[in-house]
Amino acid sequence: MAERRLKFWGWGYDDERVTVDERKALRAFYAGRFGVDGFSETPEPRLEEFELPAPRLAPPAALAGICSSDPHDRLVHALGKSFPDTVRMFARQVPNLPDVVAFPNSEEEVVRVLDWADGASAAVIPFGGGSSVVGGVEAAVGGDFKGVVTLSMVGLDKIVEIDRLSRAARIQAGIRGPALEAQLKPHGLTLRHFPQSFELATLGGWIATRSGGHYATLYTHIDDFVESLRAITPAGSMESRRLPGSGAGPSPDRMLIGSEGALGVITEAWMRLQDRPSFRASASVGFKDFFAGAKAVRALVQSGLNPGNCRLIDATEALVTQVNDGSQHVLVLGFESADHPVDDRMARALEIVRDFGGNVADDEAAGDNRAGAVGAWRQAFLRMPYYREVLTGWGIIFDTFETAITWDRFEEFHAGVMARVQAALAEVSGSPGTITCRFTHVYADGPAPYYSFHCLGRQDSLLDQWWTLKRAASDAVIDLGGTITHHHAVGRDHMPWYERQRPPLFGAALKAAKGALDPNGILNPGVLVP
Amino acid sequence: MAERRLKFWGWGYDDERVTVDERKALRAFYAGRFGVDGFSETPEPRLEEFELPAPRLAPPAALAGICSSDPHDRLVHALGKSFPDTVRMFARQVPNLPDVVAFPNSEEEVVRVLDWADGASAAVIPFGGGSSVVGGVEAAVGGDFKGVVTLSMVGLDKIVEIDRLSRAARIQAGIRGPALEAQLKPHGLTLRHFPQSFELATLGGWIATRSGGHYATLYTHIDDFVESLRAITPAGSMESRRLPGSGAGPSPDRMLIGSEGALGVITEAWMRLQDRPSFRASASVGFKDFFAGAKAVRALVQSGLNPGNCRLIDATEALVTQVNDGSQHVLVLGFESADHPVDDRMARALEIVRDFGGNVADDEAAGDNRAGAVGAWRQAFLRMPYYREVLTGWGIIFDTFETAITWDRFEEFHAGVMARVQAALAEVSGSPGTITCRFTHVYADGPAPYYSFHCLGRQDSLLDQWWTLKRAASDAVIDLGGTITHHHAVGRDHMPWYERQRPPLFGAALKAAKGALDPNGILNPGVLVP
């Protein structure tokens, strides 16, 4: 609670706004795209505009000091950071609020909060950075709970121990990205996990949601960097052994990784770290044909060169993110190493992409990853979550979804997704909207395409319009064989499609496992286990 | 059943024996080590020496055609291929036999066998190649079962479909290593999974036991090559979606991978494949000090060079396996690629190992992996399972165990394991036995050491002596922080230590999950879920 105050209705901290220049550029760009002069603007929400119901629960005296029912605390923990979350904030309508927000500073306090909630028939929502874009932390718990306690983990924010020899650290789950990297830096180490949520999100949140990270190949999810986990459940604590590898039955860690707060509260993890890279090479490569670019990426990822960055951006997205003028699809390539030069790998990678018609940009073949097309994209990527606070006020529907698909089905899948979402955009907005695609991660057996779409909505029905689009996108992804999420998680928004995707018997097994760990079903109800 | 007949009492097929020359070399070597003139020999077991109890179960008429209670079939499916398994065969004492061995040729027949067994209160033991060295397929099921049906999967031995673009294939679970590779070869593809069990073991067995494979780094277990799985459980079938990657909740595949037949019968898998390598470099490096070798391996594996082979063999094991004269510890290094030369990586790797005092053998820096020290080791590795049939008859206790440990604890761990097993060897045999070590796989955060031990036992108490050694080794591994198995699996033999290793609550969750998939607990009872 002593922390810098978060913005309850948008990304970042309370004292941060999109700059005047950014705002001007966004207005010019989107007005141009929609052929309008400007936008009517809903002003940003203020705390006093929200009428909050009285909390249904009060903590016992022993926990009062770490609990809050302050309106700002309740609002900031009511929703995540998705488009519909922001819309509801701009509409001053937050349907579900936690009654109490608990801020434990130790694992023991986590235990005591769980014990209290379990006894009081309250649901508990574990909350990290609150950057969920899938309804993962929304206090919509259904059922017969007597209240909702949201459990903010940000008080558990220490690096407890560093094992330099094994290049690993024992880290509390509530630490946010910047603090984590700052504390590792003096040791020459880094987690190198830089999702778009980096600034706000926590280690525990990344693990609970199978966050997608920095590396385009090999280590795509945070899963691979988890050496062991510790978690608190209503039935007790569980801790896996620190092991570099094991074959002793199904992995206990793999049950908790991706459990989205429904099986236990992750309190700390031993994480595998990296040395800070000192050798780098980056390049950008243009393609006239998107599928030719995809074929080049396939050859690259099957070559075993394992580029750290391998992001194919379609021409429209390149335009929107100001990587280029939209005349070409762009493949952003990067290699890095703390041990050896990587120029030879880049040279071979560029040979491969040229075989597929790629045009290597001269100025960047040996470039800096903060300059040129790479740098432009990187900057846009980091500012994107902030832009939503402006675009939502203007009634612009702007959202993303991401998936993965094997190469054999990719072209048909991509064409189908694009067509179905474009049709939905036209239906919703009355004029063609825009959907763009990039690859965030790639595998030898297929890419992870990430789609962004936008259109001009109507201020009075943004939520309905968005659901129409979300349903079209999700149906397309599942009908055409993809995963409902590659790294954004399931949350509440994806549940209907997750249930279509996962084997029903796995759902039954997961439900049974939850029954053993959380007999009263108080942990993040409605997520993963219906 | 039309298959070439397996040897029921040892490794390989019925028509195979250790050669006369191998036998001579083994006798000279071990007689020298134990300071004896020769060995009294228990003759190899013959089928007619076994008195088998009558089967307690008979299949229904509809399944009679795929079921057998023939004595050879029952014996060959009674045990795996561990040292105590072979001892019991040489003692003509097999305490637990399946009543019926079922040989389904289709998934539908698997379903029918499970339905029959479930209704008949019979336990079902899924059986692949039968190469378990941990009691994983022994018909020791406890409880109140009316009989045991062992389910041989080798009739499901087809590659159903190849997706060349995604470099993946849909493969039935009962296919053995050689057939799998032979069918992939015309497509220029390979699974490149070459465990010591390669000749006999099946794809489904590898997946169910988290088999350790060809690659020393990056892709150490078969886990990483599983794209999707299909399994039959008593509660129904389950099939995961083919996806290159996903973040949709805990991975369904990761629940079945390592489930050792206790959760379901894996019937097929989509597997990620490799192109056949055309560029190779291998080298062997000598070290005067084993821990200096280990430090070199640590630096190498943390460098990101990712050698395909990185096997540190201690001097005694180098002597026993005829890699050298035992004067040096040996690091066998290899790089391979289907896309690009790997000499630059080898050059950098050799720089690193020289920094730790490694002596690079001149004749091999650009060598062939079937020649020199590498070739000698490889040959010994492949013949090892056969040697047990000779050594057991001579009363020589010869076994292995494997684990993994983080680098910070490795030296103390290794010293402790060596000392405790050496003490047990002395206790058991009255004279110092031998324990050796190699690394089979290595991770940035620690090695996977593989220990081999031998001593001269007494023919009348080999099983007791072995258990004394096994307990000493397993206690040491668990007391000192390792995993009870890196890639041999848990089976029945490791259960007491597995229960010490895994978080109790994970055990409860797994038991609950099993309850959902296998309500009557008929699948491989006693394995993983006590």
Image: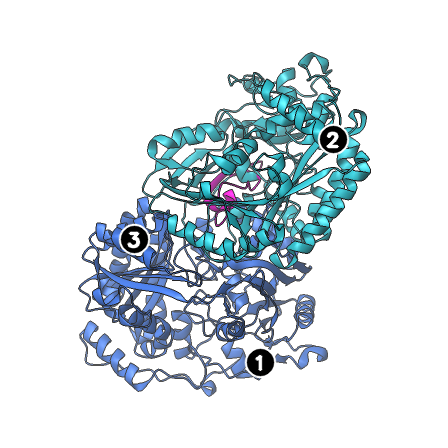
Chain colours: A blue, B cyan
Residue at the disc numbered 1? A54
Q: Which mark is residue B34?
A: 2
- Give above or below for B499 relative to B10: below
Give the residue drawn at x 56%, y 33%. B381
Does the magenta run of residues contain A31?
Answer: no
Q: Give the x, y percent position of residue B211.
A: 55, 40
B2 relative position to A63: left or right: left
- Nearest to the observer: residue A345 or residue B323: B323
Labels 3 and 1: the sequence-earlier one: 1
Q: Nearer the viewer, mark 2 or mark 1?
A: 2
Q: Nearer the viewer, mark 3 or mark 1?
A: 3
The span from disc 3 to disc 2 (Cα, nearest Å) is 55 Å
Q: Is residue B90 above or below residue B418?
A: above
Image quadrant containing the N terminus of chain A: bottom right
Q: Position of residue B177 (x, y in %)?
A: 48, 31
Q: Which mark is residue A210?
A: none
Q: Residue at x 55, y 72 (%)?
A: A175
The reply, left or right, for residue B298 in relation to residue A480 is right
What is the chain letter for disc 2?
B
Nearest to the observer: residue B213 or residue B528: B213
Q: Quadrant of residue B339?
A: top left
Coordinates of residue B361 in the picture (x, y in percent): 49, 44
The residue that label 3 is drawn on is A348
Question: Which amino acid lies under the numbered mark 1 shown in the image of this protein?
Answer: Ala
SS at badge 1: loop
Q: Which residues are magenta?
A: B209-237
Q: Nearer the viewer, mark 3 or mark 2?
A: 2
Between marks 2 and 1, how big is the CA–CA gap?
82 Å
Outermost residue toward the top in this view:
B48
Of the pair A339 and B248, the residue shown nearer to us = A339
Q: Residues within 10 Å of mark 1 (few under 14, many from 20)?
A: few
